[in-house]
Amino acid sequence: MRKRILYLFLVFGLLLPAASDVQGRVVAYTTAEQKDATVYITKTGEKYHKTGCRYLSKSQIKTTKKEAVKNGYGACKVCKP
């Protein structure tokens, strides 16, 4: 019985750090992916938008989220890109 409990502690002790490392890489990848996501700005607006947002009816200029933020644009509160 003691050997079984010791074995379980050993197995979980080795698996948990590996699982958290994988999760960290997924979060880092997702964050990088979001910065390069395609968003749209308008000629006169101060926000960036996702495709299909109702505020893109008159003009839409394709850019990346990273560039939009760099140029002072904020996220649209309606489409939440």
Image (cartoon, helix red, strand yellow):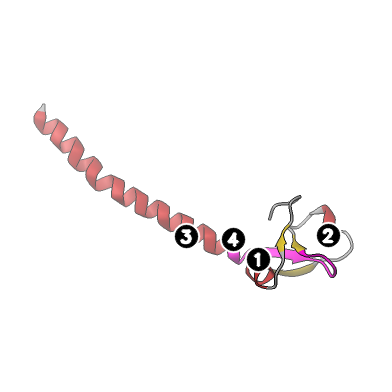
- Residue visible at 79% across and 54% down in the picture: 53
Spot occupied by residue 72 in the image (x, y as percentages of width and height): 70, 69
* Whether residue 50 is situated above or below residue 69 in the rendered picture: above
Lower sequence index among marks 1 and 3: 3
Write down the residue under mark 1. 65
Tell me how far mark 1 sits from mark 2, CA to CA. Answer: 16 Å
Write down the residue under mark 3. 28
Q: Amino acid at mark 4?
A: Gln
Lower sequence index among marks 4 and 1: 4
Q: Quadrant of the C terminus?
A: bottom right
- Residue visible at 76% across and 62% down in the picture: 47
Write down the residue under mark 2. 56
Lower sequence index among marks 4 and 3: 3
Tell me how far mark 3 sits from mark 2, CA to CA. Answer: 30 Å
Query: Dividing the picture into quarters, in which one does residue 2 lie?
Result: top left
Label 2's element? helix
Spot occupied by residue 65 in the image (x, y as percentages of width and height): 65, 65
Write down the residue under mark 4. 34
Q: Nearer the viewer, residue 47 or 30?
A: 47
